[in-house]
Amino acid sequence: MFQLTWFLALSFIIKQTSCELYTALADLKEVLHTESTLINSLDQYIQAEHKKLELLQKYSEIYKQQHTEASEDIENYVANPINAYILIKRLTTDWQHVESLMNMQLGHDYLKNISMYREYLKFPTDEDLNGAAVALTRLQDTYNLDTSALARGELNGIKYSSELSAADCFELGRQSYNNGDFYHTQLWMREADSRLNSETNKTVEKSDILEYLAFSTYKQGNLPLALDLTNKLLEIFPAHPRALGNKGFYEEEMEKLNELKIKGDDESEDIPINDEQMAPQVQYPERELYEQLCRGEVTTDIA
């Protein structure tokens, strides 16, 4: 039952994000067909590259074997007219063939095929990616879903999909950042950092995560933490140009806050600086009601 409710909610949310997004299952099936075609093309390219490398490896072994033999007794080797002929042949016609193999740009042919595929296969766009990311974060808000659980592919404790990698979480955060949604940027960049720490084969750079996380933290009003994150970024990437500039800016802002005592209405107590993440404001009452209905917080009496 929850799976159906989740699908209906997601469909509603998708329609609110972009009319160009793939709202129909048929469109998504076409995208899966595109992926299948690309996988086959990639496999063929890898096989061709393997064959090319295998040939080069064979040439290398032949060269090494004959060179070792010649090095054992150079004088006698080069004095033999047959050996002289083989040596010269190795470094003329044989080596020309090796160079031809090395110059083969197999990837170009396969990239041309992919360009042709774009004429009749359905490829999603960057706009579609952004719409899908927004749909997912709105689903997260609608059901108050935990970021880590959602990254594990779980919805209300039930696993529906494969887990997200650190790079997947990073891209969700990046899309939120591009939309000016710094709240979700923080959530997903933190999840990306958490997953990166447990990945054997790293899928994203920690410095990239820290850059987005630090600035989105500043935009959320937590200046001290933004400065701390920027310092951690500079420990990894000391010459990072944007981080160096941001560090100076944050330090100046911190000095201003220390010099200027912010007074409350009674001019006696400091107004605390917000250290909490600020969730986005609900823009429309009907959306707030819809989200409450989805979470089961509001019931409707049907006569």
Image: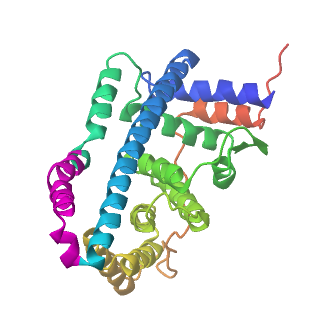
Q: Is residue 125 visible?
A: yes
Left or right for 95, reference 303: left
Asked if the stretch drawn in magenta spans residue 275, the answer is no
Q: Is residue 278 visible?
A: no
Using the image as rendered, state which of residue 245 and residue 258 is in the foreground. 245
Indicate the quadrant containing the C terminus: top left, top right, bottom left or bottom right. Answer: top right
Q: How many marks?
A: 0
Model colouring:
rainbow
Measuring 63% from the left and 52% from the top, which residue is drawn there?
147
Outermost residue toward the bottom in this view: 259
Using the image as rendered, state which of residue 119 and residue 51 is in the foreground. 51
Q: Which corner quadrant of the image does residue 205 belong to?
A: bottom left
Measuring 41% from the left and 28% from the top, which residue is drawn there?
124
Q: Position of residue 82 (x, y in %)?
A: 20, 59
Q: Which corner quadrant of the image does residue 65 belong to?
A: bottom left
Q: Main secondary structure of the magenta part?
A: helix
Using the image as rendered, state which of residue 43 and residue 9 is in the foreground. 43
Q: Position of residue 302 (x, y in %)?
A: 83, 16
Q: Which corner quadrant of the image does residue 88 belong to?
A: bottom left
Indicate the quadrant containing the N terminus: top left, top right, bottom left or bottom right. Answer: top right
Q: Position of residue 8 (x, y in %)?
A: 67, 24
Q: Position of residue 39 (x, y in %)?
A: 48, 33
Left or right for 162, reference 25: right
Measuring 74% from the left and 37% from the top, which residue is drawn there?
295
Magenta residue span? 74-100
Left or right for 188, reference 302: left
Measuring 72% from the left and 31% from the top, which residue is drawn there?
293
Outermost residue toward the right in this view: 303
Q: In the image, is residue 137 above or below residue 197?
A: above
